[in-house]
């Protein structure tokens, strides 16, 4: 079973001018065939996310006209714009909308659902999207719109801005991507207004970014990030925020957008496996965006020198077999493969931006990632692996007795939560990359111990050696849960991985059933299981919070390795292909030595150097 949205790397989509002209030509033909007598370009099956969709296709037609001067596009732009101005502008308050600061303002807004009072909660982002579609049409208006339509559209866009920033609370869904999108709309609108009015709008947009977005960033893995629906990062919306930051920097040039975009881009780079897979988020765990991410990943990937285009998006045709339609890697489509104008502004911007993909990994070591070749380890804020990729298999943290992570387990207690400063040392030598993590922990007996975890990779295999002061009972190493595998074009579910242990190794599965127990052999995805455990309905609940309620999961459990130095338990696991695995360990006053078939590593004493930093020597 394949994961529905973990598909091809986004940089695999052709992005030459000729490729984009072909996309616009397809959009034009679809739009001309679809346009109703009234001028609507909405998808006939669309019900929600609809208030901006016809205007979105109008903006694509305007760009197509600007690039090719097809007279059919010009007439379609004028007719469809007239439809939006006549039929899709609402000035009466939507019954039940809870976020107004001024009632009966008479300012225009776009509806998420057209029916009055049916689902008003989505009107704020729909109005942001409508503002962005409108300013894109204005950008292409010269020689395309008559003075009457241009003035009416300018007034509408300004009215959208005022409704978003005066009549309602700002960013009512606490979604960073929506909020930054609103700021981008203000910055783009300002260029079309008289000088004094435009400068006022621009100043307001910058102030909103500083006071309502930047001041409320959330820290995760050492980075300050725009929050998404109550969490620090979301697989779907985080890269969309990056695209909005790219557009803000493109149109305005303020360095603050570049700085924050660089931070978010480096964070994404550290999260992503070499294969482009990621997992987790406060709204969606595995539903990745596609074309909405391209601008930001491409723009900031080039800025920071990282191959962010490896990010797997929803890039395959989203339509039944045999039905035409462009892939989601270009623009939104309906169930039949037909174009939908929602998010069309992102396609406009990615066509306009000349940045090319940066296709090689960043050479700089990152605290929260170890990566070489096809092997990668992403670490969470506690420097516990959040995702391991090796041998084409992706391993998630396993769960035991309501505790989640990678680490030694003794008496049912998982030793991975730090009780003090976590120290990290990165070393590269002879085609190897290594990371040593020293973490103080406390068990049920309240004794402070030091877990030293050594991760070494040659780009094909990953060796993990964990040493801790000797434990009572029958300890084992919780070594993750094999969850997914890379098929090249797509990611599929799996419950198997190529893993070898120096001690005994077993793959266990929950003996209990129910939503609190996740069996990797079943058809249920991690995201579905997480939503089932979340406090709110799917789409509103936080799957990350839900997943934390997991009691048990499938898990790899490694026994202690033989030959450990006196006073230590040592666990040794190799992920990926290889033959026999028989590491040798030697103790000493200055630490202990690990010898494997590929390397020798000397892990320094727990006390570290003169500043307490860990010591590691590595040779192939």
Image (cartoon, rainbow, N blue to C red):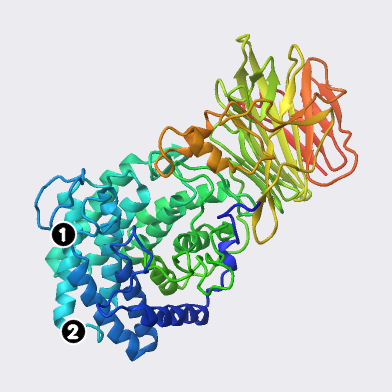
Count numbered badges in the picture: 2
Gap in angstroms between the C-alphas marked 2 and 1? 27 Å
The quadrant in which residue 72 appears is bottom left
Residue extending furthest toward the top: 445
Residue under the point 54% across and 48% down:
286
Which residue is nearer to you in this view: 15 or 290?
Answer: 290
Secondary structure category for the residue under label 1: helix
Circle 1 crowding by C-alpha within 10 Å: few under 14, some 14–19, many from 20: some
Q: Which residue is mark 1?
A: 200
Q: Is residue 382 above or below residue 318?
A: above
Which residue is nearer to you in this view: 339 or 583?
Answer: 339
The x, y position of residue 88, in whole percent, is 22, 66
Residue under the point 49% across and 49% down:
235
The x, y position of residue 484, in whole percent, is 67, 47
Q: Is residue 559 above or below residue 248?
A: above
The x, y position of residue 253, in whole percent, is 33, 63
Residue under the point 52% across and 77% down:
16
Q: Is residue 75 above or below residue 312?
A: below
Query: Left or right: where does residue 75 sit relative to residue 502?
Result: left
Q: Which residue is mark 2?
A: 146
Secondary structure category for the residue under label 2: loop
Query: Left or right: where does residue 394 sit relative to residue 51?
Result: right
The x, y position of residue 252, in whole percent, is 31, 63
């Amino acid at each position: 079973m394949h994961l529905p949205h973990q598909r091809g790397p986004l940089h695999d989509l052709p992005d030459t001018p000729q490729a984009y002209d072909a996309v616009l030509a397809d959009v034009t033909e679809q739009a001309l065939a679809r346009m109703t007598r009234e001028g609507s370009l909405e998808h006939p099956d669309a019900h929600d996310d609809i208030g901006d969709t016809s205007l979105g296709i109008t903006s694509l037609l305007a760009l197509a006209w600007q690039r090719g001067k097809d007279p059919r596009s010009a007439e379609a732009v004028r007719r469809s714009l007239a439809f939006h101005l006549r039929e899709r502008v609402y000035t009466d308050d939507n019954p039940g909308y809870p976020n107004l600061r001024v009632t009966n303002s008479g300012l225009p807004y776009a509806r998420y659902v057209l029916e009055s009072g049916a689902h008003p909660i989505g009107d704020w982002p729909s109005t942001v999207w409508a503002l962005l579609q409108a300013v894109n049409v204005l950008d292409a208006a010269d020689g395309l719109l008559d003075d009457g339509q241009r003035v009416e559209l300018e007034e509408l866009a300004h009215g959208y801005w005022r409704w978003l920033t005066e009549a309602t609370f700002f960013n009512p869904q606490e979604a960073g991507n929506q909020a930054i999108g609103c700021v981008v709309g203000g910055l783009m609108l300002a260029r079309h207004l008289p000088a004094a009015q435009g400068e006022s709008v621009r100043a307001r947009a910058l102030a909103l970014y500083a006071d309502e977005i930047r001041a409320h960033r959330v820290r995760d893995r050492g980075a300050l990030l725009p929050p998404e629906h109550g969490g620090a990062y979301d697989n779907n919306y985080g890269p969309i925020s990056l695209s909005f930051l790219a557009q803000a920097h493109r149109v305005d040039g303020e360095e603050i957008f570049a700085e924050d975009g660089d931070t978010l881009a480096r964070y994404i780079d550290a999260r992503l496996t070499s294969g482009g897979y990621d997992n987790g988020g406060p709204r969606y765990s595995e539903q990745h965006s596609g074309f909405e991410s391209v601008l930001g990943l491409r723009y900031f990937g080039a800025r920071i020198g990282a191959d962010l285009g490896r990010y797997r998006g929803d890039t395959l045709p989203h339509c039944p077999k045999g039905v035409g339609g462009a892939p989601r890697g270009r623009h939104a489509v309906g169930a039949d493969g037909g174009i939908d104008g929602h998010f069309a502004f992102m396609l406009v911007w990615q066509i306009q931006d000349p940045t090319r993909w940066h296709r090689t990994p960043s050479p700089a070591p990152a605290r929260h990632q170890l990566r070489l070749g096809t092997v990668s380890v992403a670490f969470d804020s506690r420097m516990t692996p959040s995702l391991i990729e090796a041998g084409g298999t992706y391993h998630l943290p396993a769960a035991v007795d309501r505790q989640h992570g990678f680490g030694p387990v003794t008496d049912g207690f998982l030793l991975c939560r730090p009780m003090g400063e976590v120290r990290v040392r990165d070393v590269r030598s002879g085609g190897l990359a290594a990371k040593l993590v020293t973490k103080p922990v406390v068990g049920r007996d309240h004794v402070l111990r030091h877990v030293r975890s050594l991760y070494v990779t040659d780009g094909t295999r990953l060796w993990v050696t964990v040493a801790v002061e000797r434990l009572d009972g029958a300890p084992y190493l919780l070594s993750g849960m094999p969850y997914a595998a890379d098929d090249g074009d797509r990611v599929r579910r799996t419950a198997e991985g190529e893993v070898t242990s120096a001690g005994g190794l077993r793959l266990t599965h929950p003996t209990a059933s129910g939503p609190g127990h996740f069996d990797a052999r079943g058809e249920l995805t991690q995201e579905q299981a997480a939503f089932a455990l979340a406090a709110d309905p799917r789409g509103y609940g936080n799957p990350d919070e839900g997943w934390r309620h997991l009691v048990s999961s499938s898990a790899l459990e490694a026994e202690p390795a033989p030959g450990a130095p006196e006073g230590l338990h040592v666990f040794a696991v190799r992920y990926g292909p290889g033959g026999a695995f028989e590491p040798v360990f030697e103790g000493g006053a200055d630490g202990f030595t690990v010898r494997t078939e590929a390397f020798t590593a000397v892990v320094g004493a727990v006390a570290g150097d003169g500043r307490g930093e860990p010591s590691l020597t590595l040779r192939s």
